[in-house]
Image (cartoon, grey):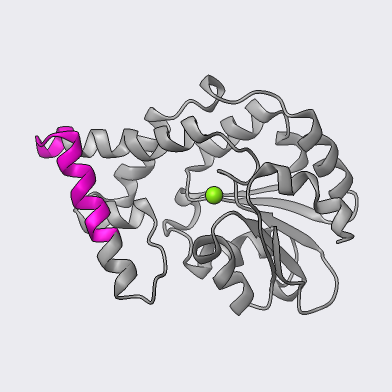
Amino acid sequence: MKIYAMPAAGRIEAVLFDMDSTLYTHDEYAAFQIESPIRRFAEIRRVPFETARSEIEAYRAEWARSHGGAALSLGNALEYFGISLTEIVKWREELYDPADFLGKDERLRGVLEELKKSCALAVVTNNPVLAARKTLAALGVAHCFSVIVGLDTCMVSKPHEAPFLKAASACGATPHTCLAVGDRYDIDIAVPLKLGMGGIVVDGVEDVYRLLATRL
Ligand SMILES: [Mg+2]
């Protein structure tokens, strides 16, 4: 876990959690979420899967090189190759079934129930809202979140600032009182820090279990 900053206001009114690889850690499901849209892209382009994957990864690597090493989301990369965001949302809704991979996490539930006594909890994800609802239900923590901002809420991917600002306002909080928690600095944390939010990068759900011990 790396704590970059606490909210500029010095208090926390809302915690904005990334979802995938933050509220759960599951390498197989993470890989599936990357591979399955690329597989569908390959089918549409009528090219072998490995060809499609190489093209997309080459574009993401080139983009990172020309943007100071920053990461590009898979969704944004697919957009470059002509797949609309609406289509990407549909694919993800069709392809992902979180319950195939994830189960109830009592430890996570305990931490989130404690946190939500003192602040609002939101999920801000590049997955569609429907996929987020299914994921939170599979983990047994859906009742802990008052706000879900997905790819189809603002129709832009993180790290665009819109999803973060939308989540803050939906929680009734100003950005200066929000704390962002996620596993990817470039995607989940860099922009919130610029907006005056706090930011914590976690290595996975094990670090989320330890959030309470950091005396937020
Ligand atoms: Mg993540």
Image coords of residue 180 (percent x, y):
67, 62
Closer to the camera in the image, 52 or 175: 52
Image coords of residue 14 (percent x, y):
76, 60
User: Quick check: is 206 in the magenta stretch?
Assistant: no
Residue in view at x 42 percent, y 36 percent: 31
Image coords of residue 91 (percent x, y):
34, 36
Left or right of 83, for residue 18: right
Q: Quadrant of residue 46?
A: top left
Left or right of 177, for residue 191: left
Closer to the camera in the image, 55 or 174: 55
Image coords of residue 88 (percent x, y):
33, 44
Left or right of 154, for residue 117: right
Closer to the camera in the image, 74 or 152: 74
Chief SS of the magenta region: helix
Over which residues does the magenta segment extend?
Answer: 43-60
Residue in view at x 84 percent, y 56 percent: 119
Left or right of 128, for residue 175: right
Q: Is residue 191 above or below residue 81?
A: below
